[in-house]
Amino acid sequence: MHMFFRTMMHMLVFSRRKPRLGHYDVAHTNFRVLPTDLDILNHMNNGVYLSIMDVARFDMLVRNGVWAIFKERGWYPVVVAETISFRKSLEPWQRFTIESRILGFDDKAVYVEQRFVRPDADGNPEIYAQGFIRGRFLKRSGGVVPIEELLEAVGAVPDEMELPEWLLRWAPDVALPATRAEAPSVWS
C-alpha cells in the first residue's frame, strides 16, 4: 500500500507541478528514504529500489506527456525485464534523485535507464545504483502495441540515440520461454 500511495502522490501531485519534459529528456525525480523502505540491516531494501524506479518512470511519463497519449489510446506499460547494480547503500532519511531516460527501442520494446544519485562531498552527482528496464506496451482492448504504432504516437527517436550493444544482447539472454519444459535449468 505504501508504494501505491507514493506512486499516486507523484502522478497526481508532484509530477504535475514540475516542468514539462520532451519525450526523450532526462527526468529527475526526488525521494527520501523512509522507514518503510528499510530492511533489517537499516538501509534501503534492494527490492524497494525496483519499486521506486516504477514511481520515477511514472513521473517521467506524466511529465513528458507520454502518459496522456497512453491514456487516450488505452495503452499501458509493463516491465518485461529489469536489472540493477548497486554501488552504495541508501540510509534512513537520505534524500536522493532518480534520473530516468528512455534509451531507445528494439523491434518489440522500449529500454529505460535509471540512476539513483546523491551529491558527493564536492556536490557532484554520485551514482549509488543503476538500473535498466525493458518494457512493452499493452492495449486495454487486448494485444501488444507494435513499436511502429508507439513511435507514430510519441515521435521518432532522435538520431543520436543508440542502444548499447550489451543491452540488446541482454534482452534475449534473460527472456523466459513460454513453458517450463522449454526453460533451460541448472536444477536436476
Image: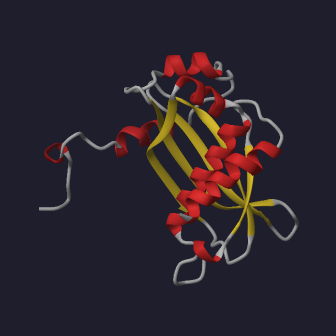
Q: Quadrant of residue 151?
A: top right
The residue depicted at 69 percent of the width and 54 percent of the height is: 9
Residue 106, percent from left and from top: 48, 28
Q: Is residue 79 left or right of residue 95?
A: left
Q: Is residue 55 left or right of residue 142?
A: right
Q: How is this picture coloured?
A: secondary structure
The residue depicted at 59 percent of the width and 53 percent of the height is: 53
Q: Is residue 128 shown above or below 74?
A: below
Residue 27, percent from left and from top: 73, 44
Tell which residue pokes out farthest to the bottom in this image: 41
Q: Quadrant of residue 188?
A: bottom left
| Viewer-proximal residue among 176 and 79 | 79
Tell which residue pokes out farthest to the right in this image: 122
Q: Quadrant of residue 37?
A: bottom right
Total tally of numbered discs in the picture: 0
The residue depicted at 64 percent of the width and 70 percent of the height is: 88
Residue 35 visible, this angle: yes
Q: Is residue 146 shown above or below 4?
A: above
Residue 103, percent from left and from top: 61, 36
| Viewer-proximal residue among 117 and 147 | 147
Q: Is residue 92 shown above or below 103?
A: below
The residue depicted at 59 percent of the width and 74 percent of the height is: 36
Q: Is residue 95 left or right of residue 182?
A: right
Residue 99 visible, this angle: no
Q: Is residue 157 left or right of residue 184?
A: right
